[in-house]
Amino acid sequence: MILILCSVIALIGLWAVVLTISNLSYFRSLTKDWENHTSDELITIAVPARNEEANIEACIRSLMAQSHPNLEILVLDDNSEDKTASIVKNLQKEDNRIHLLHGQALRQGWRGKLWAMEQLFTSSKGSYILFTDADTVHSKDSVAFGMSLLIQRKAAFLSGYPKQETKGLGTGLLVSAMLFNPTLFVPFALQEKLQWPLFSMAIGQYMLLKKEALVSIGGFSSLRTEICDDVTLARAFARNGFKQIFAPMTEVVECEMFPTFKSAFSGLERSINGVVKQGLLGFLIIMLIVAALLLLAVSPLLALTLLILSFGTPHFLLPGLLSLLGCILLSSSWAASAKRFAFSTSVGLLGHATIFFVVLMYLHGAYLRSSGRGFVWKGRIIP
């Protein structure tokens, strides 16, 4: 049995190497020629903002400085209880492209952010919409970069990971859970060709899309009860025949998604559980994945234990070496992905710890969901 488990670790490590090399090569080819493609289309930048007084000015000023020549900037104040709206009002005096929308009361049957995004969508005038979070800061070429990739790849939806600013190693380890996708899960080059909904990925910090495609799928109404709005939207595009792509955005956008370890744990457990499909089959598949991730998380300790035991019991040597090989391959792949997405070296070298945290976040989130306690986000309870 131990030999089988260690062989699984080695095979997953080998898969991680193959997938990571493929994805990093794809990302290089995707982004290298972006300056050769330009557009002067009217683009709506849509920013849902709820209690964002600490972030909103830096975000909007970075959007005001965009090199793309034709913009409108819509900010929806989602019933904030702080100075978010007054800050945006002052910025409007400096730039007539900025429009403050006062969010309507949360409509029954809707999630808060999705209702905010629906209002932004219906108020937009651009033929393209960039949805971005209020805690992002954009370089001057953020919009131009995204538009060039969208046009070059003939896609209707583009998203990608910004550079993540984190305070402290613990928060960095939690946020780097996003590296699971390029290291272990999604073959992005193949996904661009096949457009499988399961492998469609997005992050709400940067989602650029064709408005006509969003109109075609009925806006956000069909997604209104979903917990994870970004991945669900990407899957809806793919499912309805609209091409979606995922690209590194680390050079044009940065974000401090969570200021503390506690807020990161709460936010990410919500997102992880929101992505997971419910039902018996989905539950069984997820339990299998959880078991595999736990095995990966403890594999360094397992390898060390087996190699020590092999000095007295030689038949532990092969399982120990297989487990060690899997650890080295996975750690190297995780570190390479971490470097590409601008995480620190220390975070990149502690991928096994991040994988363990992913399991904890999923299990705790599943408990909150099944017990009826739900998640708390931006002062709202999400059942």
Image (tube, rainbow, N blue to C red):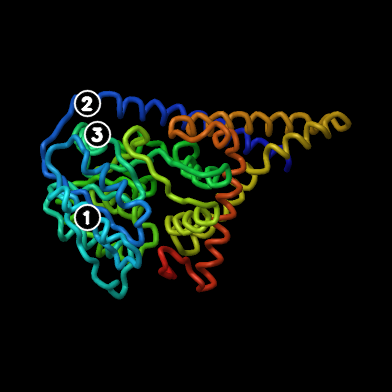
Q: Quick check: marks 2 and 1 in contact, CB under 8 Å? A: no
Tell which tag, 2 or 1, sits nearer the viewer.
1
Where does the image place residue 155, in percent across and percent down from the top left? 22, 40
Q: Which residue is mark 2?
A: 35
Residue furthest out toward the right:
312
Quadrant where the C terminus sits is bottom left
Q: CA distance from mark 2 to mark 3?
A: 10 Å
- Tell me the element at label 3: loop
Q: Please determine whether, in this image, residue 69 is positioned above or below residue 116.
A: above
Q: Which residue is mark 3?
A: 141
Quadrant where the N terminus sits is top right
Q: Residues within 10 Å of mark 3 (few under 14, many from 20)?
A: some
Residue at 52%, 69% (x, y): give it: 370
Write down the quadrant of residue 157 in the picture.
top left
Instruction: Determine whether, in the image, residue 311 is placed left or right of residue 247.
Output: right
Residue furthest out toward the bottom:
108
Label for residue 120? none
